[in-house]
């Protein structure tokens, strides 16, 4: 769907030599509470789905029905903003290419996720290109978990996107300019992006782009109503 791809938040990668995250790699979207982290993360998911890629959304905090409702509401916003024709057919295609896995009440572990992914691949012939992971508590998560996700990304030949909650009162930044809560984990991530709001608008900034030097003005301004990139 060319119309969406022209205004996707991932336009922030237009100036990147890599143009994307890539299979086998981990990426993370950071934001404070209330800025729109979940909405922007789902827009990243739609960027993949509109490219006719298959996606698995892993939620550690919400039931599948609630996650599905997020997608439905945001898709309705896209229909209005982009005047998408044949809404039902497009929605059906996107839903067919997305599976939601929820691990609630501390039921998540990497072995269970790996087993579920294998079942999708071998039992229902659903071969994902992207894994969206929402709800990991970065400060409380050990490095071994991200090592495990890196192994899964390589084993299943997919890219993995995370969301990370930052806090106004924690101002730690490492020597590479990566703020909390990714300042001690940035070596795991090929892409690190930060969503933030100012008086002049909502912006998505690229903090790390694989092994290339950060571009100071690598950012896009997003419409605060629908999180689509603005000119």
Image: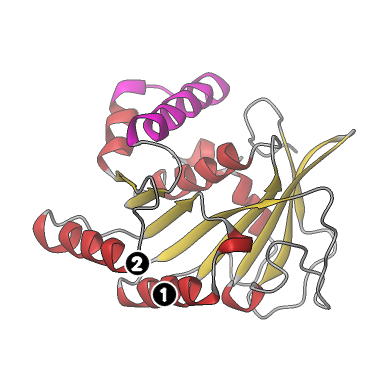
Q: Residue furthest left?
A: 123
Task: State left or right for residue 204 relative to residue 145.
Answer: right
Residue corresponding to mark 2: 110
Q: Residue furthest front?
A: 105
Task: State left or right for residue 140 relative to residue 112.
Answer: right
Element class at badge 1:
helix
Residue 82 lies in the magenta stretch: yes
Task: State left or right for residue 165 relative to residue 65.
Answer: right
What x and y, as percent, mark residue 53?
Answer: 35, 52
Depth check: give the residue in front, 215 or 24: 24
What x and y, as percent, mark residue 106?
Answer: 40, 52
The quadrant of the image that shows the N terminus is: top left
Picture layout, residue 84 above or below residue 45: above
The quadrant of the image that shows the C terminus is: top right
Marks 1 and 2 close (CB-CB < 8 Å): yes
Depth check: give the residue in front, 57 or 218: 57
Element class at badge 2:
helix
Residue 193 lies in the magenta stretch: no
As measured in the structure, the alpha-carbon distance from the residue carrying label 1 to the one carrying label 2 is 7 Å
What x and y, as percent, mark residue 40?
Answer: 59, 41
Q: Tell me the residue at 36%/36% (across/down).
A: 63
Q: Residues within 10 Å of mark 1 (few under 14, many from 20)?
A: some
Picture layout, residue 2 above or below residue 71: below
Q: Is residue 221 visible?
A: yes
Residue corresponding to mark 1: 148
The kind of secondary structure the magenta stretch mainly shows is helix
First to last magenta residue range: 64-88
Picture layout, residue 106 above or below residue 146: above
What x and y, as percent, mark residue 19?
Answer: 58, 65
């Amino acid at each position: 769907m060319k119309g969406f791809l022209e205004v996707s938040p991932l336009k922030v990668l237009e100036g990147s030599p890599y143009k994307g995250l890539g299979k086998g790699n981990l990426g993370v979207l950071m934001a404070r509470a209330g800025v729109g982290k979940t909405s922007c993360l789902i827009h990243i998911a739609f960027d993949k789905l509109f490219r006719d890629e298959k996606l698995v959304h892993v939620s550690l905090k919400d039931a599948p029905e609630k996650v599905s409702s997020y997608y439905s509401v945001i898709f309705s916003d896209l229909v209005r903003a982009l005047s998408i024709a044949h809404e039902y057919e497009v929605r059906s295609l996107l839903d067919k290419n997305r599976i939601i896995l929820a691990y609630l009440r501390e039921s998540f572990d990497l072995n269970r996720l790996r087993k579920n992914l294998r079942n999708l691949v071998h039992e229902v012939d659903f071969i994902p290109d992207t894994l969206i992971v929402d709800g990991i508590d970065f400060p409380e998560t050990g490095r071994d978990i991200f090592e495990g996700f890196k192994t899964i990304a390589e084993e299943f030949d997919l890219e993995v996107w995370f969301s990370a909650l930052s806090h106004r009162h924690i101002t730690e930044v490492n020597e590479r300019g990566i703020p909390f809560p990714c300042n001690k984990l940035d070596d795991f991530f090929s892409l690190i992006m930060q969503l933030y709001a100012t008086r002049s608008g909502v912006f998505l900034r690229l903090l790390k782009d694989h092994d290339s030097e950060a571009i100071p003005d690598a950012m896009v301004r997003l419409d605060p109503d629908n999180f689509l990139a603005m000119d």
